[in-house]
Amino acid sequence: MSVSLAACASSYGDADVVRDSPDAATSGGEGGSTNEAGSEGGSEGGGPIDAGPQPEPLEVAVNQFATCATVRSGTTAKSYCWGGASPNIKEYIGAGASDAPINGFYVPRLVGGGALVLDKIYGTGTGSWFLATGNDTQGVNEVLSWGSNLFSQSGQGVPAATQNVLPARLKTTTGGATRTLQASTAAGGTRHGCLIEDSKLYCWGQNDNCQVGSGPLPACTPGAAQLSPLQTTPVAAVGKTIAYDRVATGLGHTCVLTHEAPGGSNQATVQCFGDNTSKQCGVDNLTAIGQAQAPTGVGSGSTQQVEIAAGERHSCAIVQNKLKCWGANNANQTDPKGDATPKPPTELESAGAVSGNLSLLSLASDATCLVAGGGAAAKSRAFCFGRGELGRDGNATGVEPVAGIENVRRLALSNTHGCAIATAIGGTEVGLYCWGSNVARAVDPNAVEDRFPTPRRVLFPSQ
């Protein structure tokens, strides 16, 4: 089953929403097209906005109430988080009660420790917490979490009664020995999280649908919440060794990319387990799945040819440059032209405006975004479909480009807002652009507006 992206996509030339230079920082209203960050709102206790020379953004991630990014000036990198203002929970941005903002931005800090510089940041677009890994001065690939712990999803070993937590490293205990985990990749869902270390899968958090794992049994036997990361083996491995390459987490399900190792096939396959009541695991059995199963018709490819992502109740994969999605379609987040019933894996053909390489999948509860283009064909653009804050002009429906930005290097989507590292259309300076609800000040901490429907450049403090 397939539908054409080109049939839904609008023209490539959007209204410009930003100017390329931060020197002329003006703030547009909700419908304005000059959403350069910062002149109207002042800063939350930080004094006037310093829109001096801007650092290069390297990483960005979002949750429902906050945004975190790592930027670099010269050889110096820094990480900032902002938002969390509504509700007023500073743990969402990795800040303690006594921490003060720098022009509206907070520096995430370890409990009782110094400022964090984060190499990779993994948002929880359907949740309200973050995962990240440290850089070479703070434990290469050591995993940290912070934010909400309402469902024990932080993985810090504390029960849900501790509702919010500050940044701390994740540890696992095996054979009575406890050690800090290092991850090649990680993913945070609404109520659980997973990471991959040395091709092994570790998960934690709520386990009411076996989304953390239920052992080797095909049927799901729900268990209590797992407070700390625990190695899990949801993929059947009779007579072979399974290597885990990537992981994606939704509300109650988990998808993984795996291959046989060593000496097995170099073809990686997508497999999912957990809640399947909306076909988010990609099979027809509408019950929770204990042992992972391959979504019907998704196919396989080398690990470099497959990318996976999970929304609240739907999932997507890019397999050999083809996008396939499955699960809930109440907002056309799985099939832009289908009805509201849950969908099996459905291919969306790339053509026309969205030709070229497909990459950087990012899903929210009711939305799907990805980047298309790049190379000689065209400058890469972000495209979205479904419902939510998708950074599009007017009352766009179907598959539409995010307005005003191109050359997209990173893309992050939550239920309430989105961000991208990109350039303005026709511009050359790489910046961080965010859009959507600003009630929690997760788009721009210094703006008085509560919403920016199209991308707005975020200006960081001078370093």
Image: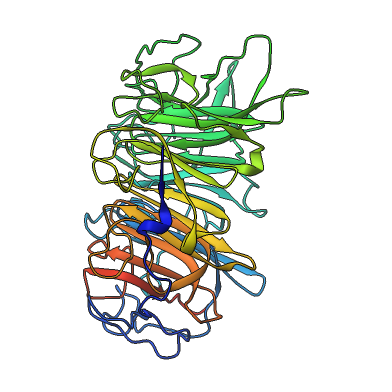
Residues 372 and 449: in front is 372
Q: Percent position (x, y) of residue 444?
A: 33, 70
Q: The N terminus appears in which quarter of the rendering?
A: top left
| 233, above or below 413, in the image | above
Q: Quadrant of residue 16?
A: bottom left
**Residue extending furthest right?**
263
Q: Picture coordinates of residue 432 (x, y %)?
A: 46, 70
Q: Can I make out residue 362 in this image? A: yes
**Identity of the residue drawn at 51% across and 53% down:** 360
Q: Nearer the viewer, residue 407 or 415?
A: 407
At 28% across and 75% down in the image, what residue appears? 447
Of 385 and 258, nearer the camera is 385
Coordinates of residue 212 in the picture (x, y in percent) = 43, 24
Give the residue drawn at x 40%, y 25%. 211
x, y percent for residue 122: 48, 48
Q: Is residue 257 left or right of residue 10?
A: right
Q: Is 352 located above or below residue 31 in the figure?
A: above
Q: Quadrant of the C terminus?
A: bottom right
Q: Residue at x 37, y 11 (%)?
A: 221
Quarter-of-image position of residue 430: bottom right
Q: Is residue 60 visible to the viewer in this orientation of the structure?
A: no
